[in-house]
Amino acid sequence: MSEREPQPGLSLERRRICLGLALLPLAAATRAATASAPAADWGVDLAHISDRLTPGDDFFQYVNQGWIDTAARPAGYAQYGELNAMFLRTQARIKTIIEAAAAQPARGDKLADLYTSYADVAAIDRAGLAPIRADLDAILAIADHVQVAQRMAHPLSHTIVGCYVFLDAGDTRRSLLHLDQQTANGRIVGLPNPDHYDTASDRYADQRAAYLDYIAQTFARVGIADGAARAAAILALEAKLAKVQWNAQQLRDRKLNYHPMPFAELSDYAPGFHWQAFVAASGYPSVETVVLNTDTAIRDSAAIFAATAVDTWRSYLAFHWVHNHAHLLPTAFQDASFQFYGTALAGQTTRRSRAERGIQFVSQNLPELVGARYVAQFFKSADRDAVEAMAPFMKQAFRARIAKADWLDPATRATALAKIDRMGLRLGYPDDLRDYAEVEILPDDPIGNIHRLKAAQIKLDALYLSDPARPYRWHLPPQSVDGSFSPQLNAVTFPAGLLQAPAFSASADSAVNFGAIGAVLGHEMAHGFDDQGSRFDDQGNLRDWWSPPARAAFDARTQVLATQYSAYAPLPGAHLDGRRSLGENLADLVGVTVALDAYRLYAAAHGIDTRAIRDGFSGEQRFFLGWAQLWRSLDTEDSLRADIERAYHSPSRYRVNGVVRNLQAWYDAFDVDAGAKLFLAPEQRAAVW
């Protein structure tokens, strides 16, 4: 999970399971997914357990040695593991759904029509620039900064600020318009991060040069003169914008990202941008209050907006308008976009077929319609019933941990218990999946289709402003191989795509299910009580409900875990940042702890003897095997280094070893003694709940 809240209509980073899901050709996806499926009928692939290593020296390696020795990273993957295989298996299933719809299209079948509109490259080439020509002409005719702001409001336009509607963190009984440095298109600028714009360093000089060339050539392809000069102006502008953006640590701070103010005062706080024109053009009704997530970035970007000439904004908007539609424009635009973003930035040498990209396109833009068919074909009601049967034991176990935490005062404990009691567990899929009946989808209008879908989404989002009681839809569709926790909704979402082997199987051993999907569910629940999620109360409101002594005790206990992880060096001299990754490491530790308790409760309720041996392993041993198997992965040195430098999640080895060495139950299950490499003396172990 990344550390930001998913919002309707806006592609923000999320509190999600860290999957690293690069995309592969779907034929390779099918092969990879099949090869990774666990062999044992109770859920663990015993053939991969090492006969040379002992659990206490390297539990991750002990469980996964055979897989590590024989598995291969598919092309295009810097990291590859079980969750990636699950994703690829799901993509292969989605492929069959969409291809079946396209092969026998019924009249008005939106899946078939959207896929056809994307896959018919000949028609797209014949249309040329006609679908975006009027918009380009309008951009080039912009006369002043007011019109620039109005143009930035389009969901497919680049902009200096994103806006979306979500619950007010200060009072979740209402929804407010939020402003953020992240936008519907992901970023305000075209390069990945501020370092790419740093001309004092040569590290990204080649990529800056390639970006300039891509911009200039884009202008040439659409017949706009002075492409090189426009490209230089865009790069200089984006360098200024990148410099004022918040870093990962700031983005993670929930309290820092909550700055409500009357809309009438926004122009005083962030002068220079035409806020009224922007919000009105965004499609939302008049608003009285707004929330600034990244307030200083928004303020400073507004100043840059005012200081930048209109002609530079015309260039910025025109280039990004073309690029944001490149996948729906003639082949030359698609190729140029891949050559820069795929090859120059990401090092990819091959591209998926148009048909395969079309499947992703449909799944992303009609997610709930695809999800309805996915559930009907690939997710049995028995699967949802089985995972729902686990959920009460997870809540019961977490509740018991909170109840017996002697470092909590009564008032703080009462709110914590109320929070776990109120926590929603969204499992599998919602019963009211959207059919997009209000959106016209035409088989020969790909750009129009996307514009209509975006406009319809904004209309739906705007309803939350006028109807405070309107329930929020799941932000993850059923086919997502992902999970998340929303502190404002106080809810965990686990779509059907995540509920597959080896994370979960209705036919697997309950010990393995609790050790895998149960621990991941516990991980998400634990985010409600980590260093950021604990700032939200049982109603999802951001407030200081912890007493100072309870907060101090919590901080002291979590610091033990942060110190442990900061000592780990996946590469020589390259240590993890235990503070940055604290929320995720804590969620792993608490998730496994609670899931083990829940397994014991479940076993007692169902007459299961946890001491019973199966293929040489007791129930609690099988529980820990399930956790370690789920996180097996292959990583390149570059991907490890990237995780060390930037990621919130620890590398897989440390998600396994760093957790189990803190749990007495693991020592007992595998007879780990003081001579083992992973051994920690009891007084050195981290324990929060």
Image: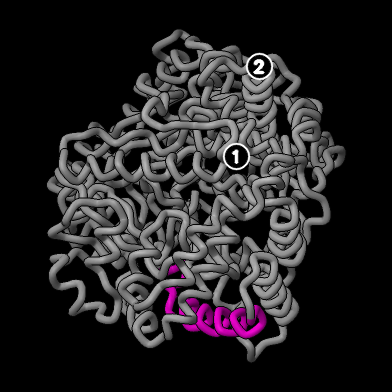
Q: Secondary structure at mark 1?
A: helix
- From which residue to which does the magenta span run? 226-250
Disc 1 marks a residue whose amino acid type is: Phe
Q: On screen, 198 above or below 342? A: below
107 lies above or below 640 = above
Question: Which residue extends farthest bottom?
Answer: 200
Residue 244 is covered by the magenta coloring: yes
Q: Residue at x 49, y 10 (%)?
A: 382
Q: Position of residue 499 (x, y in %)?
A: 54, 25
Residue with the mark numbered 2 = 42
Q: What type of secondary structure mainly makes up the magenta span?
A: helix
Dot 2, how many residues are within 10 Å of its Cα: few (below 14), some (14-19), or many (20+)? Answer: some
Q: Position of residue 25 (x, y in %)?
A: 77, 38
- Mark number, residue 361: 1
Q: Is residue 551 above or below residue 390?
A: below
Residue ID at (58%, 61%) = 322
- Residue at 69 percent across and 28 percent down: it is 92
Quarter of the image with the C terminus in it? top left
Asked which quadrant contains residue 433, the reply is top left
